[in-house]
Image (cartoon, helix red, strand yellow):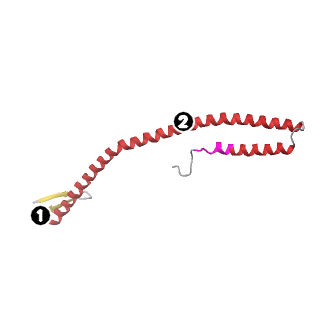
Amino acid sequence: MNQEKEGDYGRIENKEDGDPALNRKQEAFTTANKQQQADLSQLSALVTAVMPLAKEYVDFQKSKFEYTVKRDTNAGSHDRKLTLSLLIFLGLVIFAMALLTYFGKVSGDALLFLVGIVVGYLINMIQGLLYSPWETDSED
């Protein structure tokens, strides 16, 4: 009994049913096809199992980002209030020392020393405002 099979390029080949090489090829193809279907079903089951975990992870990252934005917003507002109050205080202290120096009650060296300390403090404060205390090099 002859079996007709369509080849790769559309031509028809005649094959006999009793050909052992053809039977082995067909069995290997059938086995490989079943293995691929099993792999696809396992992959589908894995994706189905992982999807809720992936959604939870995305939700966690979203809430983490929202918390970071809220924290930085609140910290920025606090830093502005603190910086303004400290600058006003330091300005008043320097102004008072300048008046005392003008009237001869305090030497100019003391005023210069105070101004140097205040400038160093301001530089340190500005550095602290520029670099967030929550950011580190090890953070991803």
- The count of marks equals 2
Say which of 19 and 70 sits in front: 70
Say which of 66 and 22 sits in front: 66
- Amino acid at circle 2: Lys
8, above or below 98, in the image:
below
Front label number (1 vs 2): 2
Q: Can I make out residue 12 in this image?
A: yes
40, above or below 95, in the image:
below
As for residue 73 lying within the magenta part, the answer is no
* Residue 33: quadrant of the picture: bottom left
Say which of 62 and 89 sits in front: 89
Ranked by sequence position, the earlier of labels 1 and 2 is 1
Residue topped by disc 1: 18
Most frequent secondary structure within the magenta stretch? helix
Mark 1 crowdedness (10 Å alpha carbons): few <14, some 14-19, many ≥20: few
- Residue drawn at x 75%, y 37% as measured from the top left: 90
26, above or below 56, in the image:
below
Q: CA distance from mark 1 to mark 2?
A: 76 Å
* Residue 20: quadrant of the picture: bottom left
Left or right, 123 with reference to 47: right
Left or right, 122 with reference to 44: right
Left or right, 21 with reference to 47: left
Q: Where residue 69 appears, x then y in whole percent?
A: 54, 38
The quadrant of the rendering that contains the N terminus is: bottom left
Element on which disc 1 rests: loop
Res. 70 mark: 2
Q: Can I make out residue 6 in this image?
A: no
- Residue drawn at x 43%, y 39% as measured from the top left: 59
As for residue 131 lying within the magenta part, the answer is yes
Q: Which residues are magenta?
A: 125-133
Element on which disc 2 rests: helix
Q: Where residue 64 appears, x then y in whole percent?
A: 48, 40
